[in-house]
Image (cartoon, helix red, strand yellow):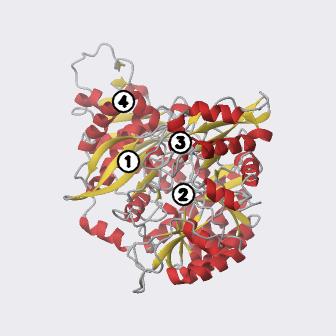
Amino acid sequence: MYQYNDDDQQFLQQRCDQFREQTRQFLAGDLTAEEFQQLRLRNGLYIQRLAPMLRIAIPYGEVSAKQLRALAAITRDFDKGYAHFTTRQNIQLNWPKIEAMPDLLGRLAEVDMHAIQTSGSCIRNITSDQFAGVATDEIADPRPWAELLRQWSTLHPEFNWLPRKFKIAVTGAISDRAAIAVHDIGLRLQSDDAGLYFEVWVGGGLGRTPLIGVCINTRLEPKHLITYLTAILRVYNQLGRRDNKYKARIKILVKAMGKLDFQTAVNNAWQALKDGPETINEDSIARFAGHFSRPNYLALTDQAPSRSVITTDQPFDRWCAQNVLAHQQPGYAAVHISLKRTGIAPGDVSDRDLEALADLADRYSFGEARVTHEQNLVLADVEQTKLPELYKALGKHNLDRANRGLATDMICCPGGDYCSLANAKSIPVAAAIEETFQDAEAEHHLGALSINISGCMNACGHHHVGNIGILGVDKKGEEFYQLSIGGEPGEDARIGRILGPSVARAEIHWVVQRLTQCYQQHRLTEEAFNQTLDRVGIEVFKSAAYEGLAS
Amino acid sequence: MKLITTVNGYPEQQEIDLIWSGYDEPHRLNDAEQRSSAVSSLQIEPDALPDAFQHHLITARLILLHLPAFTDGRPYSLAAMLRQHYRYEGEIRVYGDVRAAQLDHLHRCGINSFVLKEDQDAASALGQIGYFSKWYQPNISA
């Protein structure tokens, strides 16, 4: 994990001091609300429906036990004792007070954390694969590059006032768990005989206009990463639309210019930068890589062969089959911890949960945990022989649910319960759907299925890339939900297709249930939801979904 | 570095030979002047692209960049390109919605002259420059 040095800490301290002064000026009436808004956004602070919301950055999802404990204490001291993990690997507090913000940020800085650029029209938190460094399908560890980009993008003087927010994701594995195709810039590490390189994808995104990105560079030498990204951002900063915020993302520019013209513009801008001072030298690549060296693994051997088929109804075996993943290091496993629990909003954790997780990270996984963009956690380096006791310990804290990738592992934004942008609530919808899957046996039989819920078209709940996507809409003051099916976030990314008319809140979970029944009825052996959909066609699902529904 | 305070946040117009925007034809303030005459000061609207006016950069000594709103990032990239791409070494002056809190970033993009918005405090603006002891990016020198 990246360790802050004196310069990093000083920088963070100065940033805190700066914001303390800005807050003082605002509260004294010396800084306009309009200007303070932009300054506070770049420090993660939104004004929400009921209270301010603070989004704290967890760079590429890596968090230490010490940081988890600090977060727990902060939720107690500044909030209501709970927090929410987001779809961008961050964590949010729902009830902080503006006046307390400088102190809160100071407390975060004590454990090398901050909320810089977690909102505003600038480069946001860099996201990555939660199994970076341990995944068996990994080509190269993306974290050194993600950290390099984190530093480069932090208070970048040229790119603090972009037309709109800007999200970068990096993956280094065959299976794309970072959803790079739906990011403003998606980077995929690849390797061939000549060494490591990046594929550079641009112009993907969800929101009002969901689009899959296009690859504008199929082989970028890693040393050019910063200069090439600077060129992309420079073109976007100059040419991106500023007249309409709904058309301001880079995806709209790439689409309007076309891939070739955009590529040409980037290459032209790059000529002035290529091989210049920001070219990454071997030393700094090695230095960044050094921060992510392998922990002190014991020399162990793999235990039982990995179980991919559920052969028994024993809860531990089921949990192993569903939530435990293979590891690069013999004798170790990566453990997925579900934050999708009955009666608790998806991704929410209490202060006690955070402390329990910190203890478990210390005891079983070298003091580190990872946040996933599906709003779950991972202990990445667990000895296989310790899995039974870890499972038992997780059970004590209601963190042992074996539902990774299953129907109840829903992605869900905070929605109308908290967010002032939302058109409809999303948490109660997740709860209603979850209630229809109370039979774990039936859920396992149904198998892999992603249900993603967003309370508005900003799509924080990634509804476009869910096998079943649910979007909250407002119909004359009433909450309705539009359904789309066939979405996919990974290496075969695609946007779901709208199924038909939106349905009322009271009906939505039944419609979802009918869709899953339709899938089960029509699927062939081992066929995933989208494969069945592609084979039988959307009309079959449509008529199943709306059967008997009052229109 | 130069800090200019004016009554309305806009510089005196006489200083400018040529105004360049992205859409309109370049607009000469002094019609009597010959088109071929050397331009020593240029006013650049944020939608202009440097390629279009680069032939003036040889004679230009002063480039005024218009910041129409403090949230508009285009002049930052324009300045950076003028320095990095076109090797322009003269004065780059930003005017418009220039606020104290932004001076540091503007400065780090190669802008070396600032027309502060009327209600901004000059001392606090200057205090922003060099506020951070270290940055994660190299600065573009003026």
Q: Residue A438: where, in percent of width, then height?
A: 74, 58
Tell me if mark 4 has few (under 14), some (14-19) or many (20+) residues whose alpha carbon lies within 10 angstroms of its own. few
- Label 3 SS: helix
Above or below: residue A224 compared with residue A270: below
Confirm or deny contact between disc 1 and disc 3 (CB under 8 A). no
Quadrant of the snapshot with the C terminus of chain A:
top right
Name, please, the residue furthest toward the top.
B32
Kind of residue sitting beneath label 1:
Cys
- Regarding residue A113, the answer to whether it shows in the image is no
Label number found at residue A532: 3
Q: Say what secondary structure mark 1 lies in.
A: loop
Residue at 30% across, 32% down: A260
**Viewer-nearest of labels 4 and 1?**
4
- The mark lying in front, picked from 4 and 2, is 4
**Label 2 close to label 1 by CB (< 8 Å):** no
Q: Amino acid at mark 3?
A: Thr
Q: In percent of the image, x 33 and y 24: which residue is there?
A: B17
Residue occupied by mark 4:
A258
Q: Residues within 10 Å of mark 2 (few under 14, many from 20)?
A: many
Dot in front, 1 or 3: 3
Label 2 amino acid? Answer: Ile
Q: Amino acid at mark 4?
A: Gly
